[in-house]
Image (cartoon, grey):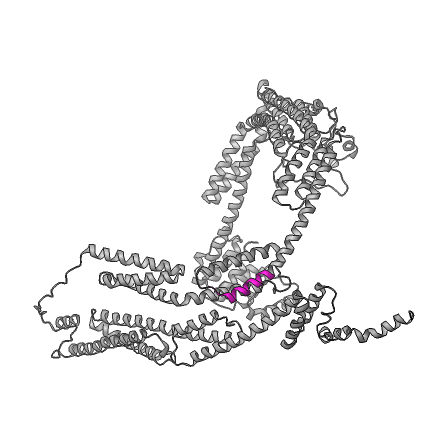
Amino acid sequence: MFSFFPRSKMSEAPEVNPAPAKTHEPQPLDALTGGAFSAATSGERAARIRDWLLTEPAPEQLQEVFKELSRRDKGAARAVRERLDEIRRAKGQQAIAAEWAEKAQALLATPKLNIADAMAWQRDAAKAGAPLSREPLSLLKIQVAQRVQVIEDLQHRVQVQREAAVLLAQRIEVLSTKPWRDALAALDALRADVAHWQEQALQLSSDASWASVDLRFPPLLEASRSQLLVVWEAFQPALAQAAAAAEDAAAPLPPVPVWADELRAARGLLAEAAAKPARAARPKPDPEVLAQATELVRAALATLEKATAEGHGKASAGAAAALRAVLKAQGKHIDDKLEQQVHAALVAAGELEGWQRWSTDQVREDLVAKAEALLTRPEGQTLGGRKMQETLRHLRDQWKQADQGGAPNHALWKRFDEACNAAHKVVELWLDNVRSEAAEHKAQRLALIEELKDWAQQPAASGDWKAVHRALQQFGERWREGGHVGEKIFAELQPLWKQALALAAAPLEAAQKESLARRQAMIEEANALGAAATLRIDAVKALQQRWQAEAQTVPLERKHEQKLWEAFRKPLDEAFQRKSTERERAVSELSARDRMVLDAANALQAANASADAQQIRAAMQALEAALRGQAQAAQVLASAPKDAQDQVQAQVQVQEESAQDATKSVAHQTPEEGADPASAAAPPAAAPKPAPRPVVAVRGDDRPGMKKDMLPAPGRGGRPGERRADRPGERDRNPRADGRRGERSERAGHGADRPLPEERGPRLGDTAFRAQRDAMEQAQLALKKLAALAHGEALTQLLTAWQQRDATQVPGTQELGVPAALRSAWTQALSAPPRGDASEALLRLEIAAQTPTPAEHIDARRMLQLQLLTRRNDPGPAQTWGQDTALVLASANDAANTHRLQRALKALLRK
């Protein structure tokens, strides 16, 4: 019996417990929702529900799933309930949209549309929650706005026509104050303008939207038309009567006083003094009353304009009522300009009162659209966490400002808040990342502080302070690049870092203090060397070497080290500057020959300014004579007493020493290691000279900064492979101590009998050398310019003589630069009457001058060149251009031939 108990129990279980039958009831919904009902956890159930909602299920299915799911898991059923609410809200919006679409269509169908009703439709539709951004309301909103724009445009054109009518009337009145003939001349233009104005006014009144214009605009247009026509109809007959009175003396005079007086004067009648009783003068208002009225109106106008600019509807309505009351009492005491400002402000206030609530909803809709677009931006343009946070904060601030200016709109607020909350998830994710990164950066900074403390425990026994300084800089860079942390965390870590850094930098700071003391001592030593009467170059070099060694051993802060270096080099630079000044003063003293060359150079500069070729050539010869006087100076110096020769030799030695010192930059360069300062400072011993000579070599072109444009004296060029020392006429570059020439020169065997070059005098000073060089260059340039001018003038005179057939105007041989026989042939050709054809001669001249030929003569030139190739024994055009010129001058003058001859002779006369 016991063995059958389990089997019987299992067989009776399906009949006794009907639970499996109940579990099969929700299976269709479970399969429909993708296994949401059979999910193990609430999170899986919610995820499967969200996936199922992406398939856009029917509302009936949503309702059934929500009914079953809300009993088991309300959290998972929330998404279904939100979808049902959206569907219900969409159905309601569709009904609202249909209702407001009918109202908009009714507004558009009415022949007379009121602007206030159109604005009220859009405002009330937004307040009711109608979807104005969707079809068909978006299209209807655009149509209503366009209709309103057309009506406003008509109203604006009415105002423009009114102003145009006033201007036309003023033109007519001005013409009535001028002579009637001026008015008659302007009658046609005025008639066309009046007809054009009437045509435009008729177009306005016949417009389809004219019935919707505000009631105050049609009377304005009609009044302007009637006023203009009255003035125009009175002006035309008066002008016709004036024209008739001018033709017939018996005709009556026009009613215009100016025209009547003009016609009376034309008829010779005296102007009748019309004794008309003067009108009673209108009493002038009191200025105080006018000022008080203007002040009251301006105060009320300022209040209304301020309220209108701020957009306060209630305040603007009260200010407009107050301004109307003041205008009613004081309107007769203000001027027209102020009255126009008052009317413009009242119109703006009236528009603001109707547009304020509508504009507030427009702002809210824009904010909702911006908030919803934050998560739907294109790929690559998504906002980061910080930018998203700032954008959301800015949007919420704008919503608060919009709520202050109008009634609240809960439907738009709900959409706006949901969009902002969805976008804020990006900000939350960014904040989580920032917190995790801050914790990581904090750990890295703490590890860096511990590493710095461990490094500080290692003693700097090697004495490599540059390596210590470099390591400290690397620690500082790692601290600066340690990543972002919060202000609170940074305030905690910064003192720890400074303490560890001060402990690690203590040995380096002690070494820097000692180095600073040594550098100060070297600065004092440099001051003493610079103040000494005699500058010791060896001591300066040794001191600079000590400074460089100290700078390489212990590094300092860059700015501090630069200041110490400037203080060290300043006295040495001043000492070298004093020495250079003394050297320049000695060199700048002009000798007698330098003064003579300088005077000749100044005279040549004056001749250059005169633009006279003869004076320039004479001054150049005088300067060359002054330069050639160096041999005479050498003779004078040789015949001078012994004391004068010694003085000159001492001056030359000073110049050589200054040239050697100028090439050295001792104050800025460090000598090579291992060099002896005394040996480096001492100049090399000069080779003994065979005979004491008071002169030195002339100034060459090897000076720093000078142009090497002075060529050496011309001589016979050497053969290929011949050395300079073997060339005849040249001195040996390496003379032997016994005064003889080099062995190579003696072995050469040629040129020994040639005399040595003439000894030249002392070198010129820098001032005289530069002055004579600049004067010579400018003189050569001036002569070139004068030669070009003379060539152009001579050619012009020759062409003038050909044009006038006057041989006396032919320039001389010197101006033309041709032989006398050739000039005689030219004068004979001009003296005879015109004869012959000059076409072939002109072609030969162009071939000789290598100038282009006009297009119409190119074939003839090619033919002539072919003929010249066959005439081998005949002289070419380059040899017979003078005779060809005579043939051209003998022919008749022509403008084209003159131009061709001028171009050819311009090139030939220069050769």
Residue pictured at 13% horizontal, 63% vertical? 281
Is residue 410 in the magenta section? yes
Horizontal arrangement in the rendering, residue 251 relative to residue 546 (left or right): left
| Image quadrant where one finds the C terminus | bottom right
- Range of the magenta residues? 407-422
Quarter residue 659 falls in: top right
Q: Nearer the viewer, residue 537 or 752?
A: 537
Horizontal arrangement in the rendering, residue 450 relative to residue 346 (left or right): right
Q: Nearer the viewer, residue 824 or 308?
A: 308
Query: Is residue 364 visible to us here?
Result: yes
Q: Nearer the viewer, residue 70 or 698?
A: 70
Query: Is residue 384 visible to us here?
Result: no
Is residue 103 in the magenta section? no
| Image quadrant where one finds the N terminus | bottom right
Question: In this rendering, is residue 729 above or below 85?
Answer: above
Horizontal arrangement in the rendering, residue 835 relative to residue 180 (left or right): right
Q: Nearer the viewer, residue 858 or 235?
A: 235
Measured from the top left, where is residue 620 in percent x and y? Answer: 52, 39
Q: Main secondary structure of the magenta part?
A: helix
Residue pictured at 64% horizontal, 42% vertical? 489
Measured from the top left, where is residue 639 in percent x and y? Answer: 58, 22
